[in-house]
Image (cartoon, rainbow, N blue to C red):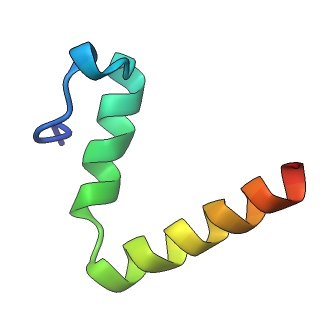
Amino acid sequence: MDGKGWKPQYGISPEGIEILGFVEALPREARRELLQAVAKLCRKAR
């Protein structure tokens, strides 16, 4: 997993780029569910 087009110049840490690579490898429906879960957690944190 390489995070495809994500680069450190974008302000993303190497660990973040690695995580993005794993997320990109997920099937579309799994990415959608993950996005919804993260959005829900962010709303709760406000």
Q: Position of residue 35 (x, y in %)?
A: 52, 67
Total numbered labels placed on residues in the image: 0
* Image point (31%, 51%), residue name: 22
The vertical placement of 46 against 11, above or below, is below
Relative to 8, 45 lies left or right: right
The vertical placement of 7 against 31, above or below, is above
Q: Position of residue 30 (x, y in %)?
A: 41, 78
Q: Residue furthest front?
A: 46
Quadrant position of the N terminus in the picture: top left
For the residue pair 18 and 38, the one nearer the viewer reads as 38
* Image point (23%, 61%), residue name: 25
Q: Residue furthest bottom?
A: 29
* Image point (11%, 38%), residue name: 5
Relative to 13, 25 lies left or right: left
Relative to 5, 45 lies left or right: right
* Image point (63%, 60%), residue name: 38
Q: Quadrant location of residue 36?
A: bottom right
The vertical placement of 1 against 27, above or below, is above
For the residue pair 23 and 46, the one nearer the viewer reads as 46
Q: Position of residue 29 (x, y in %)?
A: 37, 85
Relative to 25, 4 lies left or right: left
